Image (cartoon, rainbow, N blue to C red):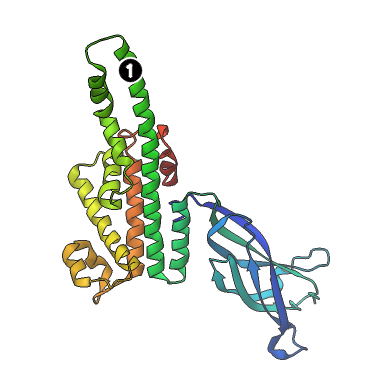
Amino acid sequence: MANLIDANYERQLVRCDFENEYFEGDHRSDKLFIYGKGQLNLSSDLLLHHSPSDYFIYKTDEYDFDASNYSEHLNITNVDHYGGSFSFSGILKTYNGADYIEFGEAELCNEIHYYSIEYDSDVWCKYVLESYRFYTVSSFQTAYLMLFISLDSLIELIVAELLDFYQHEFQEQAIFDMKNYIYQDKYPVTEFINKFLIEDPLNKILIQLDNKKRKLIEQKLDQILELCTDFSKKQRGKVIKTLTFFEKVRNTLAHGNTINIKELKEEFAIAQKYIVYDEIKFDKLFIGLLIEIMKLLKNICCNIDVFEYKKTGISKIWRLIQ
């Protein structure tokens, strides 16, 4: 997931807020029950995932003394991946067999490992991040819907990049052809315009790319595969068929309709992978769609000989899956 959206891996030492009380309410005890919370500070970054360390650093206010060996059974009790926080509890000793210690205003710290993306990341990356957040709290259906929105956004992004690329190519070719036309009189002007401009294959590609009313998977994605891979029509058809299945489930949910399991199994052989006792398992469906998105990017971006990625913004997508 982190590689897919080009998430940054970092570490941050955070100071935890905590409270303590005498163990089992006995103020004569040399043990304290401790509980509290730690919070990441991310400023404007968007959090994908974080993992607090199992090891806590406990320092007293006097001479910055490391009293970590005075803690025992200090455990992470909950991790909020959405909010970037975690809770913990455990036991602290005031006596370790050699020295007594007064904790007073001591500091308890934890080093958190986390993945995040920049706030201005591509929209499709943000949707992937949101989908993962829903997945981690077992809201699988919502996670699936969010992940499909990310696929929608990704396809539109690639179409926009291809449109820019082919517009540039068409303009360059048109200027070249017009310069050549000046020095010959083989064609009348209208015939030249029709033959070298209107009927130019690049212009036909542009017209298709610029058509916003086309179907997302069957038309837009199919054209992307045609332009950016060396897939045969049959190979493209397999990809389209698979993703059309995911699209149909998404559209049914988005319109508030009940999914017809029988119809789905009859139309798509792949449906059986995600149906258990005549019920769609959205946790599996989420993983299945995620895998298909990663395969799609790999198929598009690995065919460098077929499409010149360095001339387009698609180079960023290529970098994302390295």
Question: In the image, residue 289 lies at what x, y percent?
Answer: 33, 59
Q: Quadrant of residue 42?
A: bottom right
What amino acid type should be assigned to the residue bearing mark 1? Met
- Compared to 17, does 234 lie above or below? above
Viewer-closest of 266 and 88: 266
Question: In the image, residue 14 lies at what x, y percent?
Answer: 67, 62
Q: Residue at x 39, y 59 (%)?
A: 147
Q: Quadrant of residue 302?
A: top left
- Compared to 192, does 63 lie above or below? below
Does residue 74 appear anywhere in the picture? no
Viewer-closest of 205 and 314: 205
Number of other residues with Cα within 10 Å of mark 1, as a class: few under 14, some 14 to 19, many 20 or more: some
Q: How many marks?
A: 1
Q: Residue at x 37, y 53 (%)?
A: 152
Which residue was labeled with disc 1? 178
Quarter of the rendering occupied by the C terminus: top left
The residue lying furthest to the left in this view is 266
- Compared to 102, does 308 lie above or below? above
Question: In the image, residue 107 lies at what x, y percent?
Answer: 74, 68
Viewer-closest of 170 and 67: 170
Q: Quadrant of residue 191?
A: top left
Quarter of the rendering occupied by the N terminus: bottom left
Does residue 171 appear anywhere in the picture? yes
Q: Is residue 95 left or right of residue 243?
A: right
Viewer-closest of 12 and 151: 151
